[in-house]
Amino acid sequence: MADLAARTEALLGRRPERFVPLAGGCIAEVFRAELPGGERVVIKRSRASGPDLSIEAWMLWELRRLSDLPVPSVLASARDLLVITYIEHEDRAPDAGAQRHAAELLAALHRVAAPAFGLERDTLIGPLPQPNGPMARWLPFFRERRLLHMARLARRSGRLPAATFARIERLAADLGRWLEEPPRPALLHGDVWSGNILVRGSRIAAFLDPAIYFGHPEIELAFTTLFGPFDRTFYDRYAELAGIAPGFFELRRDIYNLYPLLVHLHLFGGGYLRPITALLDRLGIRS
């Protein structure tokens, strides 16, 4: 690890003394490192031709600037390296108290508003580009910047069949049949699932790996139903604070979850095509 230690020292001004590999993802190698004096940090190193980690740094700075959502502090960043604070936590699912705390944090985050949907710059979801060019209305934004954008990436990767892509195009052209405009653009974390939530006691210690933009809170809530870690405790508390409109759990969440399913289809292939085609069948969108 001498090269990583030297690179970190050049960026941070302190040389790590010990590295422990952590579970990462497809963006980067991830390590917990100990600095002189005992301070622990997390270091991400982008693989060759990997994504620009300075984008993640910027998103963490924005979340800290715009909201009270707990996220790690950025200590140093470059295109290929990111150093953030290590957050003490317990490797377990959130209990009822932590789920209520998560609902309170996300409801507060979603109260942060903006004039338009999107963001001032494009970001990433996982290692994939996430375009955020601002738009005045949500449905065109979701259609162009999320659903069709990711469907095109999955089609180019060869993992989305042409016939299924055509069905998604037909769905995208008629989104107003099932979805509605929200009252205002809300700040979203963008990638809330069990792997991006740290728990300590009955509290949320931090949210990790954001994919931020201003959008409809329902797409955030939908994502949490796809990969966990919440149960009714979370959704009941969120509904008390911010409301969940009728019909969300019955259908709209499944339409919004086409976006993360297409992300995973593009990256991993496999069984992620089946729930996509099942929803299109359910909506009556045929080949």
Image (spheres, rainbow, N blue to C red):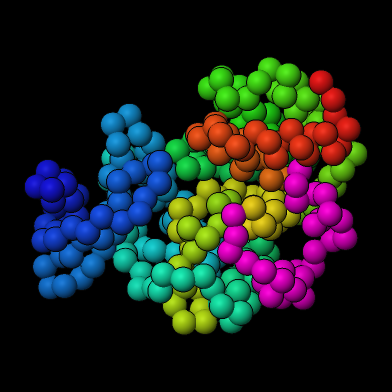
The quarter of the picture where residue 104 lies is bottom right
Residue drawn at (50%, 34%) of the image: 267
From the viewer's perspective, is 8 left or right of 104?
Answer: left
Residue drawn at (66%, 62%) of the image: 110
- Across and down, in percent, residue 265 comes to 57, 34
- Is 79 drawn above or below residue 35 in the view shown? above
Reply yes or no: does residue 228 show up in magenta. Answer: yes
Residue 64 shows in this picture? no
Residue drawn at (11%, 61%) of the image: 17
From the image, which quarter does the C terminus lie in? top right
- Is 105 drawn above or below residue 31 in the view shown? below
- Image mark count: 0
From the viewer's perspective, is 65 left or right of 33?
Answer: right
- Across and down, in percent, residue 229 comes to 58, 64
Reply yes or no: does residue 219 show up in magenta. Answer: no
From the viewer's perspective, is 228 left or right of 116?
Answer: left
- Is 182 drawn above or below residue 159 in the view shown? below
Residue 71 shows in this picture? yes
The quarter of the picture where residue 256 lies is top right
- Is 281 drawn above or below residue 179 in the view shown? above
What is the span of residues highlighted in magenta in the rendered image?
Answer: 227-255
